[in-house]
């Protein structure tokens, strides 16, 4: 390890990586870029190109990858992101750093590019990000994707019993699915002020086990738009304050109750949310899984409450 730390290319790559990744984080903080392909794809590729252009490169790639991982982990401290999202970002970013590095090494093999250790030249690959990131941010009109997640479960109780148990919940305390055991927000209680259309329903959350003191907590405020006991409870989300999740929004929460046979009910929970994360093929499956596991947690608690009340 001592030999690696003494290697000139290793130290230089740390400097270059800190500059590149630090610029991306700064742009994000200042609102000059989005959680998009420019941040997760373009920036890592140009970083890999810069590192691959270095004259002395024995441990350069090691230094770039290590520094990237440490910087991404560091943004957890102020609550800019959670553990799951950081891990996913690392898995996405590292291959693109390697891709940029390999492209330059292949070009050098055919003597298309000369080696250099000059910072003025090594920082040139950052220029495309400096131009494209703010351009995309200000020119892109549709920043959000709207997605709906639906989950169903059958309960051995009537639709009216299930409806009454879910409309307002004093305490949620049930077996937590895997993702809720990390840092996803955990619903604590939901309070319905009146049993009518136009009423306000507020759900309170706390941070997961791996969250810091504040990260992950907050509230979701809903307004009832359709209320029919034993049939449907539909709400528009009018405000949410889940700390640290600027890329995720909420639009609608719906519960449908359907009798399937005597004394049984199929409840369907639909959550409609928005996301600005791209590329979508990478982020959307995990977003949906997180929503589904929150549904599962609510269902587990509902099952427990129904048994305590009616069995």
Image (cartoon, rainbow, N blue to C red):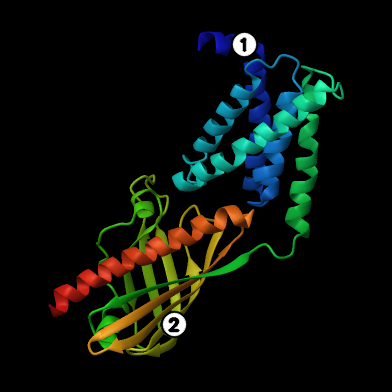
Q: Quadrant of residue 187?
A: bottom left
Residue in the foreground of this view, choosing between 200 and 208: 208
- Which class describes the residues within 10 Å of circle 2: few (<14), some (14-19), or many (20+)? some
Q: Quadrant of the C terminus?
A: bottom left
Element carrying mark 1: loop
Residue at the spot 20% in from the left edge and 76% down from the top edge: 306
Asked if residue 188 shows in the view, the reply is no
In this rendering, is residue 221 above or below 187?
A: below
Relative image position of residue 211 (x, y in whole percent): 38, 46
Relative image position of residue 152 (x, y in whole percent): 38, 74
- Whether residue 202 sits left or right of residue 122 in the image: it is left
> Nearer the N terminus, badge 1 or badge 2?
1
- Whether residue 226 sits left or right of residue 89 in the image: it is left
In this rendering, is residue 48 above or below 237?
A: above
Label disc, if present, on residue 7 of the rendered structure:
1
- Which class describes the residues within 10 Å of circle 1: few (<14), some (14-19), or many (20+)? some
Label disc, if present, on residue 21 of the rendered structure:
none
Asked if residue 257 shows in the view, the reply is yes
Residue at the spot 46% in from the left edge and 55% down from the top edge: 243
Q: Quadrant of residue 50?
A: top right
- Circles 1 and 2, Cβ within 8 Å, touching? The answer is no
Relative image position of residue 43 (x, y in whole percent): 70, 39
Residue at the spot 23% in from the left edge and 90% down from the top edge: 262
Residue in the foreground of this view, choosing between 30 and 105: 105
The residue that mark 2 highlights is 234
Q: CA distance from mark 1 to mark 2?
A: 62 Å
In this rendering, is residue 264 above or below 74?
A: below
Residue in the foreground of this view, choosing between 68 and 41: 41
Label total for image: 2
Furthest toward the right, the residue is: 112
């Amino acid at each position: 390890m001592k030999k690696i730390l003494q290697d000139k290319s290793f130290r230089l790559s740390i400097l270059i990586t800190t500059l590149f990744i630090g610029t991306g984080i700064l742009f994000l903080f200042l609102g000059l870029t989005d959680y998009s392909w420019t941040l997760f794809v373009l920036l890592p590729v140009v970083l890999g190109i810069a590192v691959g252009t270095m004259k002395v490169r024995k441990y350069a790639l090691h230094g770039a990858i290590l520094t990237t991982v440490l910087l991404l982990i560091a943004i957890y401290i102020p609550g800019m992101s959670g553990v799951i999202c950081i891990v996913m970002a690392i898995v996405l970013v590292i291959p693109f750093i390697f891709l940029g590095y390999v492209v330059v090494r292949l070009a050098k093999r055919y003597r298309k590019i000369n080696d250099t250790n000059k910072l003025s030249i090594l920082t040139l690959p950052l220029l495309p990000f400096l131009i494209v990131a703010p351009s995309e941010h200000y020119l892109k009109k549709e920043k959000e994707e709207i997605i709906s997640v639906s989950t169903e479960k059958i309960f051995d109780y009537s639709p009216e019993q299930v409806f009454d148990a879910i409309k307002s919940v004093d305490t949620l305390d049930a077996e937590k699915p895997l993702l809720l055991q990390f840092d996803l927000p955990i619903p604590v209680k939901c309070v319905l002020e009146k049993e009518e259309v136009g009423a306000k329903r507020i759900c309170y959350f706390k941070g997961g086990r791996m969250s810091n003191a504040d990260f992950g907590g907050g509230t979701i405020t809903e307004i009832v738009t359709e209320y029919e006991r034993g049939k449907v409870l539909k709400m528009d989300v009018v405000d949410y304050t889940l700390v640290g999740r600027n890329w995720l929004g909420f639009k609608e929460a719906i519960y449908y109750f359907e009798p399937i046979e005597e004394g049984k009910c199929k409840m369907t929970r639909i959550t409609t949310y928005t996301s600005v994360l791209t590329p979508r093929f990478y982020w959307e499956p995990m977003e949906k899984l997180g929503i589904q596991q929150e549904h599962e947690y609510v269902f587990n608690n509902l099952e427990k409450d129904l048994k305590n009340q009616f069995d």
